[in-house]
């Protein structure tokens, strides 16, 4: 992928993050408004990112196993009551390229995600404890509005496993709710 073919992905990703953040706040935003918040054209954003590449970054490395666009000041720190805060965080000057592994670690620390404790991993026999720990983290991240795909990336787990665990929790919750409802009726 060269710079020209990467431009569509970069634009879609930058605008997508703005739209997702607004969707979580249950506000609608047009494509034009996204462009205003970004504060530049796609070409300017591409040049801005390229000027921050480290020696080994190229447009061929964009996405998946390469680098991602990172909001230096995280999106989840927006003060939605302050237009200044919204403009600052979504502005292209707040975006920089970051290697996928570094970006994931930064996101995990911003979310307050705690890795599975070392003593639990060392035992390895206690899979129920590890599963219970991860289940709690998956549920917490679901409630915070993260997609199963993003959670699987953060936890370095298979997407199907995350989906299955989340659905198991939902089913358990529904069963517990129906039992407690029956108990309160009697």
Image (cartoon, rainbow, N blue to C red):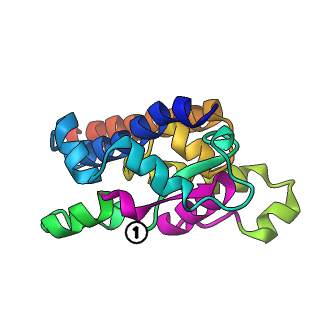
**Circle 1: element type:** loop
Q: Is 135 covered by the magenta stretch?
A: no
The image shows residue 52 at horizontal and vertical percentages of: 56, 62
Magenta range is 91-116
Tell me if I can see residue 151 in this picture: yes
Q: Write down the quadrant of residue 42 in the picture.
A: top left
Query: Residue 166, image x and y in percent?
Result: 51, 38
Q: Is residue 79 left or right of residue 54?
A: left
Taking the spot 43% from the left edge, 46% from the top edge, the residue there is: 146
Q: Is residue 74 left or right of residue 62?
A: left
Horizontal and vertical percent position of residue 147: 45, 40
Looking at the rendering, in which quadrant would you find the N terminus?
Answer: top right
Please tell me which residue lies in front, 157 or 71: 71
Would residue 24 appear left or right of 127 to someone viewing this image?
Answer: left
Quarter containing the C terminus: top left
- Relative to 184, residue 102 above or below: below
Which of the two residues, 47 or 38, is positioned nearer the viewer here?
A: 47
Q: Between 92 and 99, which is closer to the camera in this rendering?
A: 92
Give percent across and percent down for residue 30. Answer: 17, 36
**Residue at the (86%, 56%) spot, across then down:** 124
Q: What residue appears at the point 78 percent right and 69 percent down from the top-left corner? A: 118
Q: Is 114 contained in the magenta span?
A: yes
Residue designated by label 1: 73
Q: Residue 138 versus residue 12: which sits nearer the camera?
A: 12
| Residue 142 appears in view | no
Above or below, comparing residue 99 to residue 164 in the picture: below
């Amino acid at each position: 992928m060269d710079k020209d073919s990467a431009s569509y992905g970069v634009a879609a990703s930058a605008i997508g993050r703005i739209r997702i953040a607004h969707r979580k706040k249950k506000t609608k935003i047009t494509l034009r408004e996204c462009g205003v918040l970004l504060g530049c054209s796609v070409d300017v954003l591409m040049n801005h990112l390229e000027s921050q590449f480290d020696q080994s970054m190229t447009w061929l490395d964009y996405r998946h196993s390469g680098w991602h666009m990172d909001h230096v000041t995280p999106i989840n720190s927006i003060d939605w009551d302050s237009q200044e805060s919204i403009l600052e965080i979504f502005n292209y000057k707040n975006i920089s390229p970051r290697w996928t592994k570094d970006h994931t670690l930064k996101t995990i620390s911003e979310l307050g995600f705690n890795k599975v404790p070392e003593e639990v991993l060392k035992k390895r026999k206690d899979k129920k404890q590890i599963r219970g720990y991860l289940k709690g983290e998956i549920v917490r991240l679901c409630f915070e509005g993260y997609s199963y795909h993003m959670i699987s990336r953060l936890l370095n787990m298979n997407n199907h496993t995350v989906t299955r665990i989340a659905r198991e929790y939902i089913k358990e919750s529904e069963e517990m709710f129906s039992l407690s409802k029956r108990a309160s009726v009697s």
